[in-house]
Each structure stands twice: as structure tokens, then as C-alpha cells.
Image: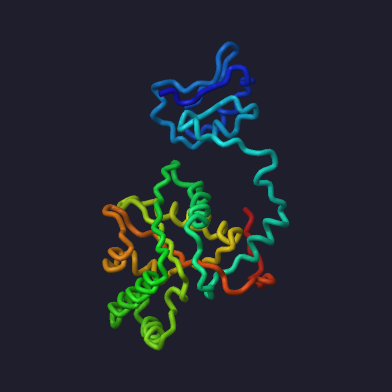
Amino acid sequence: MTTILVDQDLCTRCGICSVVCPMTIVEPAGENTFPTVMDAKAGMCIQCGHCEVSCPSQALLLNVRPDEKVPLPGGAGIISPDDMAFYLRKRRSVRHFTNDPVPKKKIEQVLDIARYAASGGNGQPVQWIVVHDPKTVKKIAGLTIGWMKTLANSPHPMSGYVPVLIGAWESGHDVICRNAPHLLFAHLPDGNPIASVDAIIALTHFDIAAPAFGIGTCWAGFVAMAAASYKPIQQEIGLPAGRKCAYAMMFGTPRYTVYGIPRRKPLEVTWR
């Protein structure tokens, strides 16, 4: 299959596509030729799309589901530095949620954004499990407490903390999932040594995009630690064979609105 398609009427032979290709497989245009990928190098293409999106004249098309290409509207995605700063600084970890469920369609919209997150070699290894039923979320929180009980009197670094958490749970306080209606799990191929970073990048995309859709999030560290090794949780969420949980995030509709920006430690930068 031809790796790139070139509109010869639009191509200006500027050479940008060959420069930006991270695999350096796009042969630059010559005086009488157009950019191309030799058959011998076609297998090296990671389908990142840098060549296509960097073409000023939109003459080049990466031949990966070309019928699905969506034109980028003029000015789309341009955010002022001030707007970006305020948006990110007001982001909060939400631990109080309404009882209103987030529609599945809205969740899919945010996940559709997260699938554009960077990944090593454009491998895109991250897949998702959404626990939408609040009753199942509560069950997973209980299973996490069950995992914590196995840590008592063990050398695990959490062993000294779990008695307080278990006590709070048994007193009726959900200190695990904070009564969130939904949970999100990112999972990866087992045995991939670098994919865990890809999962955190993708979850961060979800975390950052969610407030624009009226969704509040909080990284579910206790659940994530339990899901990494505790079979009952893995079975409850239906983790596919050959996959491992990377991390978890609780989310839902925030009960309270953010009206300000809190203080943080001063910026510390070392220049070399």
C-alpha cells in the first residue's frame, strides 16, 4: 500500500514533510519528482501523521483511513496564553459529586480526545474500562478495602496507613472513591516496560479535558494500587487477558463550583 498520497497540483515541493518525519522515511521532492516513501521503508512508518498535518498546502495525505480525514477549521484550537493559564490553574481534584450520572456519550467525547495523547512510537497501547454503574463503583471501593486488609502487619509501605482507612470505611465513610458515580481504568499490554507512561499521559488528557465538559475528576490512587495486583478487582472490572491496569480515575458531576485559584509553592527552575 502506498504510504503517502500527494496531490501534485497542490504540492509546492517545500520539503517540510521529509524534514518533520520522525522516522526520516519521506524522500524529499526533487525538481521533477514529488515526496514519496520507498517501498523498502514503508514498514518503518509509525502512522504519526506529522507529514500530513505539517504540509502548508495540504497536498499530502497519510494513507491511513484517508476517508476519515477531518479538515482543521481556521483558528480551531487556538487558545490565548492567559485563557490556558486560568483553565489549568483552576483545575481541582473533585471529591464531592452530585448523584447525576454523566451520560455515556459525553464520556466517550472526552475519551475520544484522550486517544490523541502522545505515546512512544505512536504505539497507542492504552485501552479503557469505564465503570458507569455507581453500585459497581461502591463494590470496587469495598474490594479495595479488602486488599488493604491483606496489607496489615506486612512490609508493604501502606501497612501503617490502612487501619485508619479501614476504620473510616467501616464507619460509613467512602474514603476510597469518595462516592463518585464512575470510575475510569486505563489498561495496557502486559509486559510492555514503557507503556505505563503512555497511560499516565492519556489519563492526564482525560483529566484536563473533563472540566470543559462539566466533569470533575480525581486520581484514584488507592484503587489503582489495588487493581495492579488484586485479582478480585481485576475480575470485577473485566480486565482482558494479557492486559494490566495502569491507573484509575474517579469522576462525575462536581457538587461544588470553583470560584478561585489556590496558592502553590513558588516556581523553582534551574537553568543550565
Q: Position of residue 234 (x, y in %)?
A: 30, 63
What residue is at 69 percent from the left and 72 percent from the top? 259
**Residue 43 vs residue 206: left or right?**
left
What residue is at 64 percent from the left and 20 percent from the top? 12
Q: Position of residue 240 (x, y in %)?
A: 29, 55
Q: Which of these two is toward me, 55 or 131?
A: 131
What residue is at 57 percent from the left and 28 percent from the top? 17
Q: Position of residue 120 (x, y in %)?
A: 44, 45
Q: Which of these two is toward me, 132 or 246?
A: 132
Please say whether residue 241 is visible from this viewpoint. Answer: yes
Q: Name the image quarter holding the N terminus.
A: top left
Q: Decide: is 65 above or below 237.
A: above
What residue is at 35 percent from the left and 71 percent from the top? 140
Q: Decide: is 230 above or below 153.
A: above
- The picture quadrant where one finds residue 225 is bottom left
**Residue 91 vs residue 108: left or right?**
right
Q: Which of these two is toward me, 215 or 268?
A: 215
Please say whether residue 201 is visible from this viewpoint. Answer: no
Q: Position of residue 176 (x, y in %)?
A: 42, 75
Q: Seen from this angle, which residue lies furthest top? A: 32
